[in-house]
Amino acid sequence: MATFLETDRLVLRGFTEADLDRVVGLDSDPEVMRFITGGRPTPRETVRIHHLPRLLHHYPCIGTRGFWAAESKPAGSFLGWFEFRPLADNSCAVVELGYRLRSAAWGRGYATEGARALIRHGFTELGVERVTANAMAVNTRSRSVMEKAGLTFVRAFVGDWPEPITGSEHGEVEYTLTRAQWKRQASSPDSAPPSGADRTPGPPEQSPAADAPNSTAEGDR
């Protein structure tokens, strides 16, 4: 699949069916799945039948996918994925930001770097008006990535978890960023660096509540 976006250290490309084993491996890491399933791996058939089609879905309003495989430069190693998905197939006004990276890639600023690049591309090239992201309230490092990417906290809420996991009793949080806010940030002399200069030490750097029930940041439920 052709490259969708590049940063200093990342290549974001569309998924293909040949990525099945990579996604299964990602979703088999207990640390990666800690804030998603409580650490339980996702069965291969579930990934094949339910999750991979979501990663391959084409959104007419932006003319492309909503999920992107992330590979490192220059080695091309699979790091995980980023989500920049319109909430409606026929409108790109509001998109959901998400990310899920292999635990070996944590602590290097990849999540922040990819998120900033997608936000910039969305506001300058895709006609996006607002970016939204969710996380479990206790997932402090994922929340930190949102903040470093320019999003701001807007609300806390309690979702309906059919199978609660540790921390779900504290609820979830939503962060957002509008095009107008992003433009003000971009013009500010104190704005954050645009690429990999920022680093988030330690785990985890994965998607805001990516497979959590009633979360608008569903990575590949």
Image (cartoon, grey):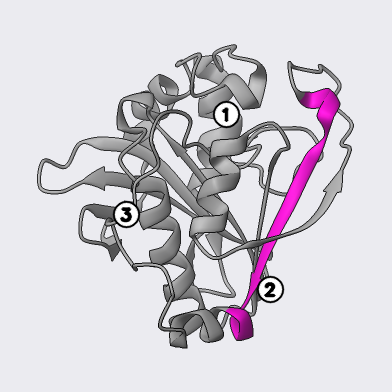
Gap between marks 3 and 2 measured at Cα:
22 Å
Residues drawn in magenta: 168-181
Residue under circle 2? 90
Q: Which mark is first along the chain, 2 or 3?
A: 3
Is 148 located above or below residue 51 in the figure? below
Amino acid identity at mark 3: Arg
Secondary structure beneath disc 3? strand
Q: In this rendering, which labeled residue sits more in front, label 2 or label 1?
A: 2
Q: Residue at x 76, y 42 (%)?
A: 215
Count the numbered circles shown. 3
Q: Splitting the image into 4 quarters, where does residue 157 fall?
A: top right
The answer to whether residue 15 shows anywhere in this view is: no
- Left or right: residue 91 compared with residue 161: left
Q: Which of the two discs, 3 and 2, sits closer to the camera?
A: 3
Question: Which residue is outermost to the left?
Answer: 74
| Residue 67 point in image, percent of width and height | 48, 51
Q: How many C-alpha atoms fall within 10 Å of the one at disc 3: few (<14), some, or many (≥20)?
A: many
* Front: mark 3 or 1: 3
In the rendered view, tell whether residue 156 sits above or below residue 90.
above
Place of residue 71 in the rendered image (x, y in percent of width and height, measured from the top left): 25, 44
Label 2 is placed on what type of residue? Asn
Q: Counting residues from the N terminus, which is met first, the one under dot 3 or under dot 1?
A: 3
The answer to which of marks 2 and 1 sits earlier in the sequence is 1
Q: To which quarter of the image does residue 104 belong?
A: top left
Task: Say the numbered circle drawn on residue 13.
Answer: 3
Q: Quadrant of residue 140?
A: top right
Which residue in the structure is indicated by mark 1? 49
- Asked if the residues shown at circle 3 and circle 1 are in contact, with their CB atoms under 8 angstroms apart, the answer is no
Where is residue 188? Give x, y as percent: 46, 84
Above/below status of 123 relative to 102: below
Q: Helix, strand or loop at disc 2?
A: loop
Looking at the image, residue 168 sits to the left or right of residue 200; the answer is right
